[in-house]
Image (spheres, grey):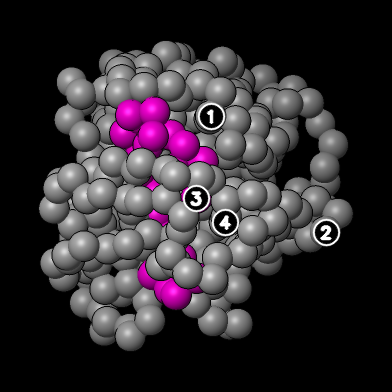
Amino acid sequence: MHSLAFSPAPSTLSPRPFLKWAGGKGQLISQYRAFFPKSQDFKTYYEPFLGGGAIFFHLQPQTSCLMDINSELVNVYQCIQQEVSKVIALLAMHQAKHCKEYYYQMRSRADGNRLERAARLIYLNRTCFNGLYRENSRGQFNVPIGSYKNPKICYPELLYTVSDLLQSTEILCSPFDAVLEKATGSSDFVYFDPPYYPLSATSNFTSYSRFAFMEADQIRLQQAFAELAGRGVKVMLSNSDCPFVREFTKISRSTRLAPSAPSTPTPNGGEKLPRFWSPRPKSLPPKGWRPRSWPPWNLEPMGSLGAIEFSRCIYV
């Protein structure tokens, strides 16, 4: 174990994502803000597809439950929560040794205790190509090194603030539908940000771990969404704006919102931002059911609806 020691110092730095994550929502928060429930309107926040946690860090809820099926990612958050100083010491070691040869040496390893694995994942994330997290079928990280001159690997001040925020957070390695066992009513707010349904064959990046997210999973996700909303839970879902996804959700009226950076709207890709929906299910689709028309339950719009016409889709 590396012998460097760090101690927290008073900081005015706000918690924010410490991992780079494909599909992260950090740059879109300014457009999502109007669609989040007010902090006084919910007690517990749930995020079943954690990733980089941009929405969690923006909301900074007093009580929360973060979930992900990626056990190594969950281990990182748990180690930052519980033993952040030791993780920082290991990151300082990685910072000092970083080079191309060292990167591939670390990428090839899968051993070590939980702290060593957490620090190694953060190191690889901060130095790999575009901050991608991708595994092969054997669960091995396989992203090449990025072209960074001096990547910031060890950021003690940020990690201490993140650790402070995580103290009131439950962090679980669970599938997304485990949230059904926890969120029960109007004091709960659930945000789903799954691997998006691909708009084309070339955009088919539906998993960042060996557990692919397929059409059947998308259907299970919509079932979970409907069940939670039926309980009165405040629930928000992002996904591709495409015919397959639209078959689950009727849109009443929409308003085009400008993206955070100049972008040309695509005819089949957009991001829907409905406000609040009150589903009244007649029946839920059976497992394995593939939609051919609108779902067999009614979705009654309870407020305004917005749309971002560029890459993704959110249903609230």
Residue 237 sits inside the magenta stretch: yes
Query: 49 left or right of 260?
Result: right
Residue type at the position of mark 1: Leu
Camera-side residue of 133 and 248: 248
Query: What is the CA distance from the residue labelled 2 to the residue labelled 4?
Result: 21 Å
Instruction: Write down the residue under mark 1.
Output: 180
Residue at image position (32%, 62%) is 250
Which circle's residue, 3 or 2, is located before the other in the chain?
2
Can residue 284 be found in the magenta stretch? no
**Which residue position holds label 3?**
222
Q: Is residue 303 above or below residue 176?
A: below
Q: CA distance from mark 2 to mark 1?
A: 29 Å
Mark nearer the N terminus (4 vs 1): 1
Q: Residues within 10 Å of mark 3 (few under 14, many from 20)?
A: some
Q: Which residue is mark 4?
A: 218
Residues under numbered marks 2 and 1 in contact, where contact means CB atoms less than 8 Å apart: no
On screen, residue 102 versus residue 195, left or right, reads: right
From which residue to which does the magenta span run? 221-245
In the image, residue 273 sits, relative to residue 164, either above or below, namely below
Amino acid at pointer 4:
Gln
Query: Could you tell me if residue 119 is visible in this image?
Result: no
Q: Position of residue 212 (x, y in %)?
A: 70, 57
Residue at 53% over, 29% down: 180
Please tell me how many numbered marks the rendered image carries.
4
Q: Residues within 10 Å of mark 4 (few under 14, many from 20)?
A: many
Q: Amino acid at mark 3?
A: Gln
